[in-house]
Amino acid sequence: AAVDHDSIDDDLIYNVTQSPVHGSLVNESGQVITSFRQADIAAGKVRYVHDPAHSNFTQDLFYFTVTDGTSVTAPVTFTITMHPYNYAPELTTTTTAPLTYTENSTAVVIDNNLTIANADPASLLQSATVAINNGFISTQDVLAVSTAGSITGSLNTAGDTLTLTGPATAADYQTVLRSVNFQNTSDAPDTNP
């Protein structure tokens, strides 16, 4: 913030001499601006909006001068550092060996110790998918899940992909994913992977 002891906030005007490269300065209406007053800053009416096409850049800057109508400062550099958000959650499975299933057994939970870490805890997860990638036989193999809260589950037409949907926390998705289970309904299951 600029300080000029003989001027009020409305008299101090910031003039952008070089705009940001990876985003824009905007007012409260979202319109791009190249000048603003100290009073606008104090009221939170000046914002930087990062351009999503430049998401790989974590810093931006712009240059400006400040005037009170009488004097003008030398150009000043303002550096902006972006902290990425909306990271993809990280799923860690604890099962590395093929799932063991005994003929005519009840359903077997696939991984009751998997974990989900969400680096963006303020955001809710929206979906998860579990699929049998190898050796699936639609007349024998069954994927199932115990859903909870806002999370619902559905199988695709083939039956080899279970999709969970609904806004929920990482902890809620972790609980539901830990309940995903497999069962083979055949009396003579195909044992080929």
Image (tube, rainbow, N blue to C red):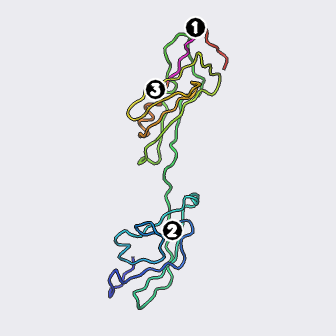
Along the line of sight, the residue nearer the viewer: 125 or 139? 139
Q: Quadrant of the C terminus?
A: top right
Q: Quadrant of residue 150?
A: top left
Relative image position of residue 114 (x, y in whole percent): 49, 32
The kind of residue on which mark 2 rests is Ser
Pair 3/1: label in front? 1
**Which mark is first along the chain, 1 or 2?**
2
Which disc number belongs to residue 187? 1
Relative image position of residue 130 (x, y in whole percent): 54, 31
Pair 3/2: label in front? 2
Q: What is the CA distance from the residue labelled 3 to the residue labelled 2?
A: 46 Å
**Which mark is first along the chain, 1 or 3?**
3
Q: Quadrant of the N terminus?
A: bottom left
Query: Was residue 184 drawn as part of the magenta stretch in this picture?
Result: yes
**Which mark is first along the chain, 2 or 3?**
2
Query: Was residue 13 drawn as part of the magenta stretch in this picture?
Result: no
Q: Residue at x 56, y 11 (%)?
A: 103
62 above or below 123? below
Relative image position of residue 46 (x, y in whole percent): 41, 70
The kind of residue on which mark 1 rests is Asp
Residue under label 3, please give it. 179
Relative image position of residue 88 (x, y in whole percent): 52, 45
Along the line of sight, the residue nearer the viewer: 46 or 102? 46
Q: Are marks 2 and 1 in contact (CB under 8 Å)?
A: no
Specify start and end residues of the magenta stretch as a single range: 181-187
The kind of residue on which mark 3 rests is Ser
Q: Quadrant of residue 99?
A: top right
**Residue 141 shown left or right of residue 121 in the figure:** right
